[in-house]
Image (cartoon, helix red, strand yellow):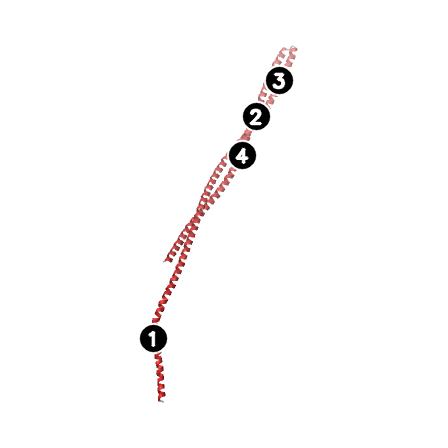
Amino acid sequence: MAVKKKAVARKPAAKKAAPKTRQTGASKTTARKPAARKPAARRAKPRALKKTAARAEELSVAQGIAGVEQMSAGLDTLTEARQAADFGHIALAEGASDLTRGAAQLEMAEHASQLSDVTAVMGQRDVAQGAEMLNTAGEIATVSDVVRALSAGDMQHGLSLAGLAGQLATVSDVLDTLRMPVLSAFLDDTSGQLRDLAVSSLLRARDTRDLAGLLHRTGRTVAGYGTTEMAEGLVRLAASEDFAAQSAQLASAGADQVAEGLAELALAQGARDAAQSLVLEGVDQIAGGAQAIGASET
């Protein structure tokens, strides 16, 4: 029984010794933990630095690429600005040329209008002079007809007087044969006077006939001048209308040319403004891209 007690008594001692050993191992383990973590912490820090450096490098490369793209966009914008400026220069040259041509056409239209007015005045004057000449020719023809009628009357009157003179001369000869000398002499004298009157009348008829012919020819000449003047007047009036039509066409074309020139100048001004805006935008993009590239290299 004594032995059993001893055995029973020792069992708890053995159990107590075991925890002590565990506690000692646990305490050792606890004491060693900080020494084991320090190398782990030192190994983790270079990895983080590498990750951070890789991330920074990626960001730097992306920023550099963005800067290059921004500079490329800026160069494209400057190219567009140059194209806009070139277009503006072309539009400016064309606008100036159109304005010059339009002004020249308007000046020609003014000259054509003035020429039309002058030609119209000259044509109206020619027509008036031609009408006046034709009127004068008509009056001359009337006078010629009157004179011609007078000539015929004088001739008829002269022939009548000549007939009477002949008759009286015959009677005078008969009376002289019948020995009536006084009456025969009277009738002979009267016959001579009538003969002289007949001759004068016939000569006057001839002169009047010549005058009538002269008047007729003069009337025809004046009528020809009048017809020519009227024809020239009508031609000048037609030319005046042509000049007026040309003036209207030139004025319309000149106005259209001037309007087109002004539109092209406005387009050139717009292209110039757009080119200036694009230049500023391109410079800003290039500056921003250079700044981004510079920041990526630091």
Query: Badge 1 is on which residue?
Result: 28
Give the residue at the far front of this rendering: 3
Q: Residue furthest top?
A: 179
Q: Dot 4: within a 10 Å radius of its alpha carbon, few (fewer than 14), some, or many (20 or more) residues?
A: some
Q: Is residue 211 above or below residue 124?
A: above
Relative placement, left or right, of 236 versus 21 is right
Badge 1 local density, few (<14 within 10 Å), some, or many (20+)?
A: few
Of helix, strand and loop, which one carries label 4? helix
Decide if residue 105 is on the left or right side of residue 25: right
Q: CA distance from mark 1 to mark 3?
A: 196 Å
Q: What amino acid is found at the position of numbered circle 3 in the picture?
A: Ala
Question: Disc 3 versus disc 2: distance between alpha carbons?
Answer: 32 Å
Query: Looking at this view, is 95 or 130 the one in front?
Result: 95
Q: Which residue is mark 2?
A: 217
Q: Quadrant of the C terminus?
A: bottom left
> Which marked residue is nearer to the observer: mark 3 or mark 2?
2
Q: Judging from the image, what secondary structure is the residue with disc 3 in?
A: helix
Q: Residue at x 53, y 34 (%)?
A: 235
Of mark 3 and mark 4, the one earlier in the sequence is 3
State the separation of the CA atoms marked 4 and 1: 138 Å
The kind of residue on which mark 4 rests is: Val
Q: Is residue 122 left or right of residue 287?
A: right
Confirm whether residue 127 shows in the render. no
Quarter residue 176 falls in: top right
Question: Could you give the CA–CA distance between mark 2 and mark 1, rounded to whole angstroms?
Answer: 165 Å
* Discs 2/1, front: 1
Q: Mark on residue 235?
A: 4
Q: Looking at the image, which residue is at 39% across and 60% down? A: 57
Residue, disc 3: 162
